[in-house]
Image (tube, rainbow, N blue to C red):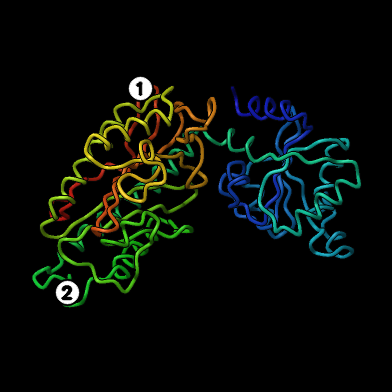
Amino acid sequence: MTDGTLLDTGLGELGAAALVVVATSSRDPYLAPFVRGARLHHSLLIVPRGGAPRLGYFTPMERGEAAGAGLELLTPEKLDVERWVRDHPSHELFAHVLSRGLHVLGIAPGKVALAGSLPAGWLLAVREVLGQEGWTLEAGEALVERWRRHKGPGELAAIEQAAAGTCAAMRRVAEMLAASDASKGALTLEGEPLTVGRLRSAVAQCLSGYGLEQPWGNIVAPAEEGAIPHSAGTDERVVAAGESLVVDLFPRGLLAADCTRTFCVGEPSADLARGHATVLAALDAAREAARPGARGWDLQEQACRHIIAAGWPTPLDQPGTTRGYVHGLGHGVGYEIHELPSFRRDAAGAAGRLEAGDVITLEPGLYEPEDGWAVRLEDLYAVTEGGVRNLTPLPYDLDPRAW
């Protein structure tokens, strides 16, 4: 299907006359796929069924940015924005501007699919005002999520740029660890303690050089902190020899990237070394099996069976476990850090199957909170007709000196 056909088909399934996206920023993941990186504040998009998208913006000062989106425009004058700002409470602004946009496009009151992010009070006003005019609203997020799933050349290039910055930042972490002094147990670098915060600052500086931000933060988590998978790590914590250090970076430029490595300065424990080998083998097997048509949950089951055979619990044999392998194998990446395809058991149809054009992660891990160590290895892949292409081709070694 072409993009337009996919949107039209989805609108037909919903019985909706148009898709409407409303946002306080063009970085909203439901609006961003349409606007080619244009930077706008209050804005909306109307895609009539069978028609071309129209982008509405709220101030003449943003006319240059709006034009850069390459879409037909609904200008502030056409939308009568000045009147609505003057005569109505601010929380009703979007409601009246959206109503005006639908009228300008000749879309008669009926059903529309709504997506995007607004404050709750503003969304309630949209529903109330449009409802009084005869409109009914259907949830349109799933339609946009399906439409934005497959990455075109420009989107893939944006992800590759984010991945390049992620790899550079990960190498910087490895360099700092490799250059540290571990002779006293707690690591020092250039005579100063090597803290989680110091590593995090180096990551931020490196990513900023690639034009990347970290809206979701990052994970730099040593030992028992890393053994709780979403623990970000404590900035004041000094990294120590012999302990695991999970580093998970997921920055965003126009689109996002995601990559994880686990380090250990000095000799790892036998369990940590064995855990690392188990996770790496699970990642290798998942990469070989990942191709168009593969079901994400089948790949998760495969990873679970591999890890069970090595002696650790997983969600497959011990649902709810907090040690061993405790999470899903992967997820789609793009305008959001988690998007389609899904690796969940209940993901139905195409939503749960890999397709050419997807960008995904694979990220098996092992966590031992009581023993105070963890391993997670994660790469970012473009799904192609023949399999997957690794967008984060970094070493996997625990020892940063091997990098």
Of residues 1 and 312, the one drawn nearer to the viewer in this rendering:
312
The amino acid type, in three-letter code, at marker 2 is Glu
Quarter where residue 313 is shown: top left
* Residue at screen point 46% across, 32% down: 358
Q: In this view, does 296 lie to the left or right of 43?
A: left
Instruction: Find disc 1 in the rendering and name its residue.
Output: 386
Q: Is disc 2 placed on a helix, strand or loop? A: loop
List x then y, in percent, for residue 44.
71, 48
List x then y, in percent, for residue 53.
70, 37
Q: In this view, does 242 lie above or below 296?
A: below
How far apart are the alpha carbons under marks 2 and 1? 47 Å
* Residue at screen point 81% across, 55% down: 125
Q: In this view, does 341 lie to the left or right of 229?
A: right
* Identity of the residue furthest to the front in this view: 318
Upstream in sequence: badge 2 or badge 1: 2
Q: How crowded is mark 2: few (under 14 residues within 10 Å), some or many (20 or more)?
A: few
* Residue at screen point 66% across, 52% down: 117
Q: How crowded is mark 1: few (under 14 residues within 10 Å), some or many (20 or more)?
A: few
Instruction: Find disc 2 in the rendering and name its residue.
Output: 190
Of residues 186 and 30, the one drawn nearer to the viewer in this rendering:
186
